Image (cartoon, rainbow, N blue to C red):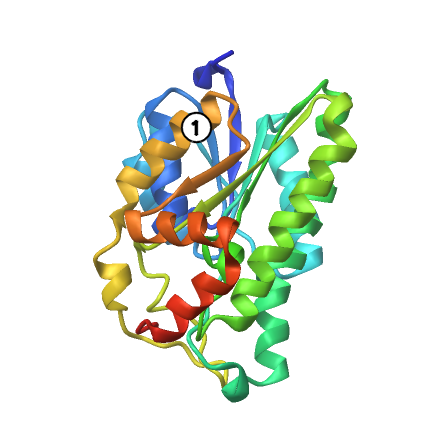
Amino acid sequence: MKTNIKDLTIWITGASSGLGEALSIAFAKKGATIILSGRNKDNLEAVKKRCKKPKKHIIVPFDISDSEQTKSAYQEVKAKAGHVDWLINNAGVSQRSLIMDTSEDVERQIMELDYFAQTRLTRLVLPDMIAQGGGKIVMMSSVAGLIGTQYRGAYSAAKAAIHLWANSLRAELYDQGIEVATIFPGFIQTNVSINALTGDGSVQGTMDEATNKGLSATDFAKQVVKALSKGEEYIIVAGQQEKMAVRVNRLSPPKLYKMIRKSKVT
């Protein structure tokens, strides 16, 4: 049964740019009330203004990697919105560095933001979501979390971890009205590669060619809104090349990694 989006209050993290911005605008267009979160209040305000009926939406800025700020943010969300129907865990950071060139501190930083911050916020929201009779948790994984490639060791590991954590959550809470969906983006035209961390923790600062040629964030959001409203749980939004890699991996992982080793991945 298709969900009536206009009846929902949806909390989207990482909403100040990229995929989060596109999802906020797309869900607002369908009539949902959006809670926009991220670290930069001014950027969130700018995204809010781009949403349909901006006055109905709510800004709650905070640093998701800070546990105390996360707790305070949820209290603010409850005070301003009353409840959350869907939580879309979109905040995160990517990586562009070889494993041997990446410090443990940087790997921990990636894992903290892309895994622990997401599971922390989800556990915070779930008790109220269960008490209200149900809701949806959405995790933003990645095609990289399904196959793993060069220059994304810690990122792929974190995205694979969030994918499997979501699978376990779905199994545990299916009878309590909680739906769990995981999204696996491929190359999407955002600033993800510009903001990606290198081996010493500095940002890459440049756009990857593959990212620049990827799907538009608007197209990504349209596909996600449609899939989530239909109740899909495993959503790959990517170009043909990434989708082919996922299919090959299912049939023959050794064949895929022969292809990856020969490919130019940056």
Q: Which of 226/62 is in front?
A: 226
Q: Position of residue 64 (x, y in %)?
A: 59, 56
- Above or below residue 216? Residue 134 is above
- Residue 235 left/right relative to 104: left
Residue 265 point in image, percent of width and height: 34, 72
The front one of 85 and 230 is 230
Q: Secondary structure at mark 1?
A: helix
What residue is drawn where x is 56% and y is 70%? 154
Badge 1 amino acid: Ala
Q: Is residue 189 left or right of residue 196?
A: left
On the image, numbered disc 1 is attached to which residue?
Answer: 227
Give the quarter of the figure containing the C terminus. Answer: bottom left
| Residue at position x 70%, y 57% in the image | 67
Q: Quadrant of residue 132?
A: top right
Residue 179's place in the image compared with 120, above or below, is: above
Crowd class of label 1 (few under 14; some 14 to 19; many from 20; radius 10 Å): some
Identity of the residue drawn at 65% across and 32% down: 78
Determine if residue 27 is in view.
yes
Count of numbered tags: 1
From the viewer's perspective, is residue 139 above or below residue 230?
Answer: below
Residue 64 appears in view: no
Q: Residue at x 48, y 54 (%)?
A: 249
**Left or right: 12 as drawn, with respect to 18:** right
Q: Residue furthest top?
A: 1
Residue 161 percent coordinates (x, y): 64, 56
Q: Is residue 97 above or below residue 114?
A: below
**Residue 110: percent from the left, percent from the top?**
57, 68
